[in-house]
Image (spheres, rainbow, N blue to C red):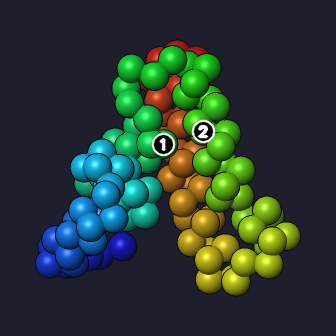
Amino acid sequence: NRIHPAEIDFLKKVADIFGFSEFEFARIQASHLGGDGGDPFLVLGVTPDIADKDLRTAYMRLVRENHPDGLVARGVPEEFVQIAQEKLKAINAAYESIRKKRGI
């Protein structure tokens, strides 16, 4: 998960070309690279003021999209399944972190 600062700069330029906002870029970066200690809200692609019910909905959507069993059933190559496993770990950790902080 080491990435050179020049690579981040390049990816930011690409994100800008494709019209991604800074928040969207940060969310993608956090979910794929872990970030710098990780903002759990970024990993889940939500803002800190999200309602608990909406938080769970966002979490469940990400779990469905990244669950290895679903990817295998769709015929996704093994290397992508392995990446999804790592993403799912980050998603689960982020959700659990927010749940603990909120007491839910």
Residue 62: image location, x then y, percent: 61, 48
Is residue 8 visible in this depiction of the protein? Answer: no
Image disc number at residue 59:
2
Residue 75: image location, x then y, percent: 80, 78
Image disc number at residue 82:
none
SS class, disc 2: helix
The residue carrying mark 1 is 44
Residue at image point 57% right, 55% down: 89
Residue at image point 43% right, 63% down: 32
Quadrant assignment, res 61:
top right
Q: Amino acid at mark 2?
A: Tyr
Quadrant assignment, res 50:
top left
For this view, does 72 lie left or right of residue 93? Answer: right
Instruction: Assess whether mark 2 and mark 1 are in contact (beta carbons under 8 angstroms).
Output: yes
Q: Nearer the viewer, residue 18 or 102?
A: 18
Residue 19: image location, x then y, percent: 31, 58
Of the 4 image quadrants, the one containing the C terminus is: top right
SS class, disc 1: helix
Is residue 39 visible in this depiction of the protein? Answer: yes
How many discs mark residues in the rendered view?
Answer: 2
What is the spatial separation of the Cα atoms under label 1 and label 2, in whole angstroms? 6 Å
For this view, does 18 lie left or right of residue 92? Answer: left
- Crowding around mark 1 (Cα neighbors within 10 Å: few <14, some 14 to 19, many 20+) is many
- Crowding around mark 2 (Cα neighbors within 10 Å: few <14, some 14 to 19, many 20+) is many
Q: Amino acid at mark 1?
A: Leu
Q: Nearer the viewer, residue 1 or 54?
A: 54
Q: Nearer the viewer, residue 35 or 12?
A: 12
Earlier-in-chain disc, 1 versus 2:
1
Residue at image point 54% right, 60% down: 87
Residue at image point 36% right, 73% down: 1
In the depicted structure, whether residue 91 falls above or below residue 70? above
